[in-house]
Amino acid sequence: MKALKIILLFVVASVGSYKAYAQRFRMEEADNSKLEVVFDAFRIDDEIRFVWNVNNETNIKSYEIARGIETGRFVNWETLTTVNAKAPGSYTFIDKDPVLGEMHYRLKLIAPDGSSIEYSPLFRISTPLPEGHVKRE
């Protein structure tokens, strides 16, 4: 996989307790084929739902969704799930236990040999804190 080429779209929409985030990005493979990923996240009440679609999985073995929490100047990442690539290239994952406050999410694409890894642009998502709750640092 070659480096990320273009971020085509980043959208945030909000309706009541429902908030949607959308990303679309393209990468160029080593064989010059185009890889397009549509990666959406939806915050519905206390859950974060991820849906992603990939047009070409020839050079993808699996995907990981990772959540990152800021700790000072750094982000500590944890893998929430790993999903093996399969046709037709449509996937869903739900984070049923998101951290209160602000967190980051990213989609990791892993090549069949495991050595080549690409990351999506980051999602920054906030989960509402209960009234009177102080955000942890």
Image (spheres, rainbow, N blue to C red):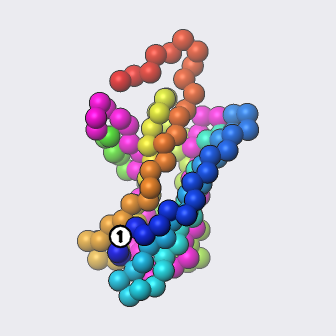
Residue type for callout 1: Ala
Residue 18 in sight from this viewpoint: yes
Name the residue nearer the viewer: 70 or 85.
70
Q: Quadrant of the rendered structure where residue 4 is?
A: bottom left
Q: Is residue 41 above or below residue 24?
A: above
Residue extending furthest bottom? 31
Residue interval drawn in magenta:
45-74
Query: Is 60 inside the magenta-drawn segment?
Result: yes
Q: Quadrant of the rendered structure where residue 81 is?
A: bottom left
Name the residue nearer the viewer: 8 or 24.
8
Q: Is residue 27 left or right of residue 21?
A: left
- Few, some or many C-alpha atoms within 10 Å of disc 1 (few <14, some 14-19, many ≥20)? few
- Quarter holding the N terminus is bottom left
Residue at label 1?
3
Residue 39: x %, y % from top left: 55, 59
Residue 82 in sight from this viewpoint: no
Task: Provide the secondary structure element on which disc 1 rests.
Answer: loop
Residue extending furthest left? 115
